[in-house]
Image (cartoon, helix red, strand yellow):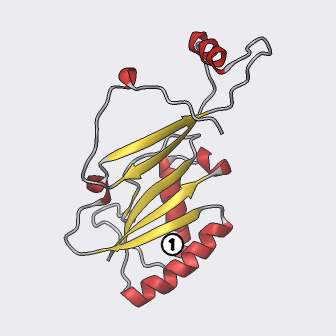
Amino acid sequence: MRLFLGFKVKGDLKWISHIEYIRLFERMFKRVDMNILYSRGFNPHPKIKLPVPKSIGIESEAEYCEFECDHDDEQIKRVMKELIKLMNKNWIDIFKYVIVKEGEKALSKRIDFIKYRFYGIIGVPEIVKDFKGVIEYYLKDDMLEMKVERDFSFSKFSREFDFKSVDREIILK
């Protein structure tokens, strides 16, 4: 049986690499007695996939993991409750899991686009008096410290765009 698992990456977990996440999930699955299937061959490895590698140092509201296991529906529900409880203790928030039906596309083939949000704290010198001055001050500056978030979309419609032609949107909170 194949499953998709959605989780959030926050805090110090943003410093874990792609391969370390796979190892982390493998260890967590063993702790809750999840029977993960292994590849065949000389050097078998667990069938755990993270379709889009996350850059190190970036928090995420939506990361996804795909894995195969040897459980029926009732066992999956029991084991997933234990896994969610265990992961929450270890600062990983699992927000979704989906049992994949036979013949459905792999997770990596279902993602149409990834949305990134960049945000940061703007410090403005006292000589700048109005909002237009803030914009002008930062347009001339070469560097602005930003944070990055990303979301996945599984819709059938996506739009490609050139970052140079994107309108800059400033949201005040």
> Please, what is the three-letter code of the amino acid marked with disc 1?
Phe
Q: Residues within 10 Å of mark 1 (few under 14, many from 20)?
A: some
Indicate the quadrant containing the C terminus: top left, top right, bottom left or bottom right: top right
User: Front-most of 28 and 8?
Assistant: 8
At horizontal 46% and vertical 40% (from top left) the residue drawn is 116
- The answer to whether 66 is drawn above or below residue 82 in the figure is above
Q: Is residue 100 left or right of residue 89?
A: left
- The answer to whether 103 is drawn above or below residue 73 in the figure is above
Residue 164 position, x and y percent, is 38, 20
At horizontal 55% and vertical 75% (from top left) the residue drawn is 83
User: Front-most of 88 and 150?
Assistant: 150
Reading the image, the residue beneath label 1 is 29
User: Front-most of 34 and 118?
Assistant: 118
Q: Is residue 74 left or right of residue 20?
A: left
User: Front-most of 139 and 52?
Assistant: 139
Residue 99 position, x and y percent, is 35, 75
Question: Can the viewer see residue 33 in this picture?
Answer: no
Q: Quadrant of residue 43?
A: bottom left
Q: Determine whether the residue tagged by mark 1 lies in a helix, strand or loop.
A: helix
Residue 170 position, x and y percent, is 55, 30
At horizontal 31% and vertical 30% (from top left) the residue drawn is 161
Q: Quadrant of residue 132?
A: top right
Indicate the quadrant containing the N terminus: top left, top right, bottom left or bottom right: bottom left
